[in-house]
């Protein structure tokens, strides 16, 4: 079964750091670009970051640029998001999502999400 | 990058058709044939329903169709069923520095 499972969410104080992980299974992880998408409570979806299959190309939304770092370990079939200098507005469910090859902005497999709460 | 514009709500009776619009600019929706649509039920992860404007992933019923004209994309759900009641989000590629700009979402109610 094709699956993505996020972990690492939790409660953190403003200015703090957190590292999210996403474990992939059931497909050839190293062949796909991967993304993080977040959803604040009661709000819509927001694309956060993207990494190509070989980590050659990395992109960030302006809202997280300079604070978040995306990475992957193809040997471990894992995707990561290092989040530093966290703000209240970063509070959201964070999803990892697989991107269809050659199809931009087409996220075909999603994890169940992990909740990040930034509060003092 | 501003979010794409969707109506906050839409509704229809079982068996009817409903169309949800998604308006962007020439920098996103109008500039690329990379518009996707996602269905999200409460407490669940989003599900890809349409990609590249009008393509359906395997397993998505052909009651769901997509189109685009200029800077506006549309999702049409035909033969509405109770299980179609959900939030729907459009998404567009907007260049290499913005891999996906989403709409604000539309809550579809099946009356």
Image (cartoon, rainbow, N blue to C red):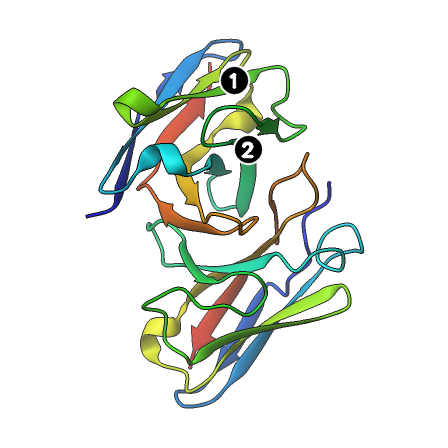
Q: Position of residue A52 (x, y in %)?
A: 50, 32
Q: Is residue B42 left or right of residue B109?
A: left
Q: Quadrant of residue A9?
A: top left
Closer to us: B31 or B18? B31
Q: Which subunit holds the residue at mark 1?
A: A
Instruction: Identify the residue at horizontal 56%, vertical 68% (top origin).
Output: B9
x then y, percent, for residue B89: 53, 58
Q: Is residue A40 above or below residue B30?
A: above
Residue, far bottom: B15
| Residue B15, horizontal then vertical, whole percent | 40, 90
Q: Callout 2: helix, strand or loop? A: strand
Q: Which residue is labeled 1 in the image?
A: A69
Out of A29 and B6, give the one closest to the viewer.
Answer: A29
Q: Is residue A57 above or below residue A103?
A: above
Query: Could you say whether the residue bearing mark 1 is in a helix, strand or loop?
Result: strand
- A22 vs A117, left or right, is left
Q: Are marks 2 and 1 on the same chain?
A: yes
Indicate left or right for B14 with B97 as reference: left
Examine the rendering and report whether any part of residue A89 can be seen. Answer: yes
Q: What residue is at 73 percent from the left and 57 percent from the top?
A: B24
Task: Give the answer, above or below, for where A16 lies relative to A58.
Answer: above
**Crowdedness near tag 2: few (<14), some (14–19) or many (≥20) residues, C-alpha within 10 Å:** many
**Residue furthest left in the image:** A1
Mark 1 or mark 2, which is nearer the start of the sequence? 2
Q: How many marks?
A: 2
Relative image position of residue B90 (x, y in whole percent): 57, 58
Badge number at residue A48 = 2
């Amino acid at each position: 079964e094709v699956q993505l499972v996020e972990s690492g969410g939790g409660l953190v104080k403003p200015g703090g750091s957190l590292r999210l992980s996403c474990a992939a299974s059931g497909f050839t992880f190293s062949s796909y670009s991967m993304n993080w998408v977040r959803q604040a409570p009661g709000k819509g979806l927001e694309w956060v970051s993207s990494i190509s299959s070989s980590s050659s190309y990395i992109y960030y939304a302006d809202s997280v640029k300079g604070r978040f770092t995306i990475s992957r370990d193809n040997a471990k079939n894992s995707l990561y998001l290092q989040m530093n200098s966290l703000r209240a507005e970063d509070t959201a469910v964070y999803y990892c999502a697989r991107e269809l090859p050659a199809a931009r902005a087409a996220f075909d497999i999603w994890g169940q999400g992990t909740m990040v709460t930034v509060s003092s | 990058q501003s979010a794409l514009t969707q109506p906050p709500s839409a509704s229809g009776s079982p068996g009817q058709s409903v169309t949800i619009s998604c308006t962007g600019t020439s920098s996103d929706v109008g500039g690329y044939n990379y518009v996707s649509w996602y269905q999200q039920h409460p407490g669940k992860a989003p599900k890809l329903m349409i990609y590249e404007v009008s393509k359906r992933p395997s397993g998505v019923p052909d009651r769901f169709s997509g189109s685009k004209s200029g800077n506006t994309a549309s999702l049409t759900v035909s033969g509405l069923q109770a299980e179609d009641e959900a939030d729907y989000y459009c998404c567009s590629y907007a260049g290499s520095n913005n891999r996906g700009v989403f709409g604000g979402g539309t809550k579809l109610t099946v009356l």
